[in-house]
Amino acid sequence: MPVEIKNLSHVYSEGSPFEFQALKDIDITIEDGSFVGIIGHTGSGKSTLIQHLNGLLTPTSGTVLVDGEDIFSKKKNELIQLRHHIGLVFQYPEHQLFEETVHKDVAFGPKNQGLSEDEINQRVQQSIKMVGLNYDDVKDKSPFELSGGQMRRVAIAGVLAMEPSVLILDEPTAGLDPRGREEILAQIKYLHKKKKMTVILVSHSMEDIGRLVEKILVMNAGEVVFYDSPNRVFTEIETLERIGLAVPEVTYLMRKLKEKYPEIREDIFTVAAAKDEILKVIRG
Ligand code: ADP
Ligand code: MG
């Protein structure tokens, strides 16, 4: 499902002394089946933006079209239907786990979709497996007995169980150790590749974004700074630094190497690509 964001602005607490414009005229399209990364300094409007995509927040002006339909012209029950297609995993989603068992927690969404008992069970098992957990090991546990990384996965499984066409994740690796982060990112990559899911990933890490996504949306103070391929975005080092961001470490290294090897490519942002390019240049 393509998601078109049309001249979207959002003002919090409009008309009060706390009025704050968090989004200014955002106008971009997220193509069906694409993998988009959103990056920007804290407070740049990332979370505000994604909460408009399933109708949790209402625009002050502008709108969002999903599959060509204006989601804010919908009636309330249609909006609830829409939320099943646009899966939103909040930041620290494990704070929203609340059932006594992992099974029940993951079943919550599909239950609300009115599916049959059999179908619910099948979805729960599948999605728990999809996030790399063993269903039989965890199904009867309380979510609160699990490790932080496991809780995060259960929360993601709860969204996957609704089989969304678009999966939006707000900093899904925040606070996890490197191994937990890798595993979650690998699962997300898998869902995008194998299930052709449209994925929108909000992340702090230029490294992660650089090696995963097809397109990066860079935000600053509620506005779009860039919406382009990692290749293009990572050559804009000066602009990125001005808005408090950095390119991946390895891109800085390539830039440094260019002083010695003028022919070396700078538009490189993964260690693997850097290795290939360096070997190519030094071997002549
Ligand atoms: P990000 O996710 O990029 O860190 P947010 O979308 O959470 O940014 O916030 C964007 C701006 O809007 C911030 O300055 C934040 O303080 C402000 N903001 C967020 N939520 C509210 C709210 N409920 N009321 C008022 N201001 C808010
Ligand atoms: Mg945020």
Image (cartoon, rainbow, N blue to C red):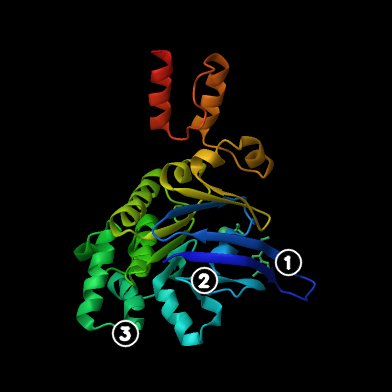
Q: Residue at x 54, y 40 (%)?
A: 232
Q: Label 2 sits on what residue type?
A: Leu
Which quadrant would residue 115 be assigned to in this image?
A: bottom left
Q: Position of residue 178 (x, y in %)?
A: 40, 44
Task: Work out whether residue 24 or residue 56 is closer to the camera in this orientation and state it.
Answer: 24
Q: Secondary structure at mark 2?
A: strand
The answer as to whether callout 1 falls within 8 Å of ligand 1 is: yes
Dividing the picture into quarters, in which one does residue 113 lie?
Answer: bottom left
Q: Mark 2 and mark 3 in contact (Cβ < 8 Å)? A: no
Between discs 1 and 3, the one toward the N terminus: 1
Which residue is under mark 2? 65
Q: Which residue shows up at 52% across the image and 69% down it?
A: 53
To which residue does mark 1 refer?
20
Work out whether 20 lies above or below 271: below
Between 127 and 35, the one lying in front of the other is 35
Q: Tell me the mark number nearer the camera, choosing from 2 and 1.
A: 2
Q: Position of residue 177 (x, y in %)?
A: 41, 47
Front position in the image: 15 or 140: 15
Closer to viewer: mark 3 or mark 2 = 2
Q: Is mark 3 within 8 Å of ligand 1?
A: no
Q: Callout 1: few (<14), some (14-19), or many (20+) C-alpha neighbours within 10 Å?
A: few
Left or right: 169 in relation to 222:
left
